[in-house]
Amino acid sequence: MTLSVCGLSAVRSGRTILFPTDISIEPGARIGLVGASGSGKSTLGHALIDALQDQGARVAHVPQSPDEALDPLRRMAFHWREAEQALGLPHDAARQHALFRALKIEKGDLRKRPWGWSRGMQQRFVIAMALVGSPDVLVMDEPTSALDPVVAARTMALLEEYLSTRQTAMVLITHDLGLAAQRVARLMVMDAGRIVEDGPTSDVLTAPQSAVAKSLCMHRNWLELPC
Amino acid sequence: MMRGILGLLLRALVVLTGTALATFTLLWNAPGDAATTIAMARFDTLLSDVVVAQVRAELGLDAGFWPAFNSWIVPLLSGDFGNSSVTGRPVWPDLVSAISYTIPTALAGLAIGLALAIPLAILATRHPGSWSDRFAVGIASLGAAIPAYWLGLLLILLFAVKLAWLPAMGARTPAHVILPALTLGLGVAAALTRIIRSGILEARRQPFLPAFRRRGVSDRDLARAHVAPHAATPVITVLGLELAFLLEGIVMVEVIFSRPGLGSFLVTAIGARDFPKVQAVVVVTALLFVVINLAIDVIYRLIDPRTGTQDA
């Protein structure tokens, strides 16, 4: 079932940082939300999560850095259990194992606290935790910017493989057009709180219409990173 | 680990020797003649120079600072606190009996302090800046501004004199501990409320909390499982310092309420220049501090094992 939200907007200290925006998301869609810093990508992401949750859709969120997703004083096992309980799910060791295997973190020691894991593993744990309730939409806010390119590429590949057999749609918020180009089918370009361009990734990349999209494409990091 | 323990022991040794030496020096150099004061405390009357000279020789006060200090500290190394200069009785049994009065007062004071401070701080942080916050902070500031000796007298006036609900002086019944503990507790609560309040506000700013909320974790679970431990870390650190103030305050409170204990023990001993008694209190208090700080260190590391990984 296609999810759609209308009139998403946000005002902060009297200034509009997100103008009314409509978005529809098909099951299994791969949507990239790109734009310069301060263009309102994350704001739109947060507004989208809130609106979809209000509709009763299952939405999971992966923040930019594991520091924004994990409590350094709590063990990994606690985080996992809490995430399950928050969704009202019973503990399921098989599901946990399947997710850990999919993201290649099955060797991680759950008795440790986040800082006992590498950052790449922490981020993959956060992604696994986001997938625990089989969400309809997974909103990822610069999920790999805290990781080195090789780890980032591997993480995204593992995630894509896992999602390929599922209905979960992914909204990837990023300023890295190179990452988006490889991972999403539809690109939305944001500027100053508005979506200025929305179309298939290849169209936007080859024939950008708006000034922002053109400049983004020009400054795209063409260095062939593995991602 | 071994290095850590050795470091702690070494630190404890430095603290203990330092405090023992410092108080001995102060007491030795205090104005007035020590032997005369001791002799007067002993016989409760003015005495001839002959008797004073006798006391001086008997206690080794004529031998100079270092021999006197050594004759106190050497037996202590084998656990002997020596005999009172005034009564001649061993210091240790009297000290134990004094401690047995002080510890319950201190613990009750701390318990009252925490029992008041935690709800007040939670009330204050429910709506920061609101009237309830200002009320709680106001109460806390008021408590911090009132000195223990005045507060103690006010409490006596209200509960013992006017209402006649509670006994004021002595330590005959368990009810006698209430007013002294309340005096201490109100002071402790004042300082702790502000620290717990800012601890909670600080903990609420942790960057990971929005993600937990989006994950569906309820506000109640968030407060209990994530905000509380982060708020507790600064509080535990301060709790050690707070215990220092508590021991300081207890001397005053015990004197105000004529309650036997370490405070009155110390005040009498200082008045009579009873070196072994004063020194015993100082050593025991310093030791208590070392143990409390050690315990805080351990608790701190249990909550946040990152602490202490670089520094033993």
Image (cartoon, rainbow, N blue to C red):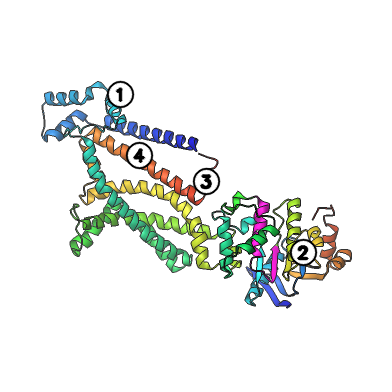
Residue that badge 3 annotates: B307
Same chain assignment for discs 2 and 4: no
Residue in the image at 43% along x and 61% along y: B121
Instruction: Name the residue type under label 4.
Output: Leu
Q: Residues within 10 Å of mark 1 (few under 14, many from 20)?
A: few
* Amino acid at pointer 3: Thr
Residue B69 x %, y %: 29, 27
Count residues near mark 4 (Cα–Cα under 10 Å), then give few for <14, some for 14-19, many for 20+. Answer: some
Q: Are marks 1 and 3 on the same chain?
A: yes
User: Magenta stretch?
Assistant: A118-140
| Distance between the alpha carbons at the discs numbered 1 and 3 | 41 Å
Q: Tag 1, which chain?
A: B
The residue labelled by disc 2 is: A34
Give the residue drawn at x 28%, y 35%.
B279
Residue A99 showing in the rendered view = yes
Q: Which one is nearer the viewer's eye here, B201 or B281?
A: B281
Q: Chain of mark 4?
A: B
Q: Position of residue A127 (x, y in %)?
A: 67, 61
Chain letter for mark 2: A
Which mark is nearer the camera, 1 or 4? 4
Quarter occupied by the N terminus of chain A: bottom right
What is the spatial separation of the Cα atoms under label 3 and label 4, in whole angstroms? 24 Å
Q: Are marks 3 and 2 on the same chain?
A: no
